[in-house]
Each structure stands twice: as structure tokens, then as C-alpha cells.
Image (cartoon, helix red, strand yellow):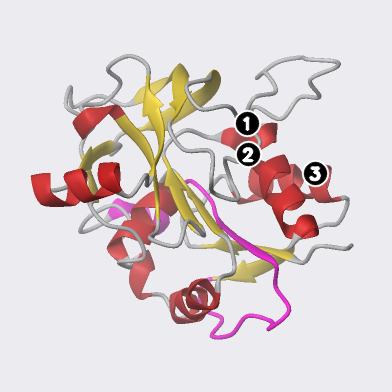
Amino acid sequence: MALNAAVITFPGSNCDRDMAVALETVTGKAPMRVWHGDADLPANLDFIALPGGFSYGDYLRAGAMAAKSPIMSAVIKAAERGVPVLGVCNGFQVLCESELLPGVLMRNANQRFVCRTVGLEIANTSSPFTNGFTKGEVIRVPVAHHDGNYFADDATLDALEAEDRVAFRYTEPCNGSQRDIAGVLSSNGRVLGMMPHPERAMENAAHPGLGGADGRRVFESVVESLVAA
């Protein structure tokens, strides 16, 4: 099965090529590269990725302007049809600002840019992105962000917990995120936003090199889920 993926690029995206390489590595097929000003996406898309970066220079609020880009209407419609959508770092911010995911990403609690590899506990194993993991397992994935402090009101946080929509948690304080949340799922589990960068940990597990291999399993989980569907 040849999977059709797309990577959305906004003005200021800087991880779109990394995301495209990661998807081609796992699927064997180069993803479509889509500019934010485009209005449509192919109906046969199997997967959409919103990469990291600083869309529109993070003016107003990180992801706020990108959420109003023409392509986001098509992304929202695809998500409503059940197409898996992954937003990483700035992509997570865009998904929240587009209201595909609840909450908001605020300035890090220490007011500093965080750039290091962190531990992530797997909190959900039922989504297309996480079903290749074991609940409670700890993986290591790089982070690189200045606005990664996940915030939502208590009612929203309680609902996320009750509905098993927290995908990943930091194993140690990272940026002030409430309840150490590093990744959040939509109500149907088909949209994932995460601050850590799985596309930067894509080495082959059998021949590991710089960056580790744990991030690769996020993409492999999606591919396996789509092939099995």
C-alpha cells in the first residue's frame, strides 16, 4: 500500500524538510509538499503533518496567524473526515489555535528557549500515533521551543485525563506544562499535537546513531495503523 502524505509549510517553518525526510524514510514515498497559501488538499491523502518552526515569526501568538492560512480550512476538513494529522512543536501550536485541539501553548515558564533531549512517558496506546508503544514506557525525543508551556483550564485538563487524550508526558519538568503534558489527542484520537520532535530521532533501531530511534516509532505506528485499516 503506497501511503499519500502531505507536509504543510508556512512562512517561517524550518522543520518541514526534516518532516518530509522522516515520512519518506518510513513510507518509502516522498510526501507532497504543500504551501500554506494553497486552498485545497487531494481527497486521497492518508496523512497530514504540520512541522515545527516559527510560522509568521510567532507574531501575535505562536501559531495564531498560521491558523488563519487558507490551507488550514482544508486540513480541518480532512481531520473531520478522519485523516490522521500530526502537529509537531509549532504544528502543535497551530492545531490548538485552529481549535482542532484544546488548550494553548504559552511562553516557557523559565522564559528561556529549551533545547535538549527529554524523557517522555507514553500515556496513551490506543491512537494511530501511539499504538506501537507500551503504556508507561519511557522514550527519549528532542525538544526545541520557546513557547511549549501547555495550558488549559482545570475542566479541560480533567476531560483530557478522563478521555485518555494525553498522549505523552514529560518525565521531568520541562517548560511549565500543566500536568507535564507533552502531547494531546483529539476526541477521536486522529489528531495529535506534540512539542517534542520525533522527526529528529529517526535512526534505525538496529543501527542507532545521532538523535536516537524513538521518534521513528511514532511514524511507524501511523503507517501500520493505516495499512491495517
Instruction: Tell me the residue that label 1 is attached to.
Output: 215
Helix, strand or loop for disc 2: helix
Crowd rating for badge 1 (residues with CA inside 10 Å; few <14, some 14–19, many 20+): many
Residue 11 placement (x, y as % from top left): 47, 61
Specify whether 74 is left or right of 48.
left
Does 145 appear above or below 206? below
The residue positioned 76% from the left and 48% from the top of the image is 224
Crowd rating for badge 3 (residues with CA inside 10 Å; few <14, some 14–19, many 20+): some
Asked whether residue 41 is drawn in magenta, I would say yes
Indicate which disc, 3 or 1, sits on the residue closer to the N terminus. Answer: 3
The residue positioned 58% from the left and 61% from the top of the image is 84
Helix, strand or loop for disc 3: helix
Asked whether residue 145 is drawn in magenta, I would say no
Residue 229 placement (x, y as % from top left): 74, 62
Q: In front: 190, or 19?
A: 190
Indicate which disc, 2 or 3, sits on the residue closer to the N terminus. Answer: 3
Specify whether 66 is left or right of 124.
left
How far is disc 1 from disc 2 in space, using C-alphas?
Answer: 6 Å
The residue positioned 70% from the left and 67% from the top of the image is 46
**Bounds of the magenta segment:** 36-58
Residue type at mark 3 is Val
Main secondary structure found in the magenta portion: loop
Task: Check contact, mark 1 vs mark 2: CB within 8 A.
Answer: yes
Instruction: Tell me the residue that label 3 is attached to.
Output: 26
Residue 28 placement (x, y as % from top left): 88, 50
Helix, strand or loop for disc 1: loop
Q: Is residue 151 visible?
A: yes
Instruction: Tell me the residue that label 2 is attached to.
Output: 218
Specify whether 226 is left or right of 64.
right
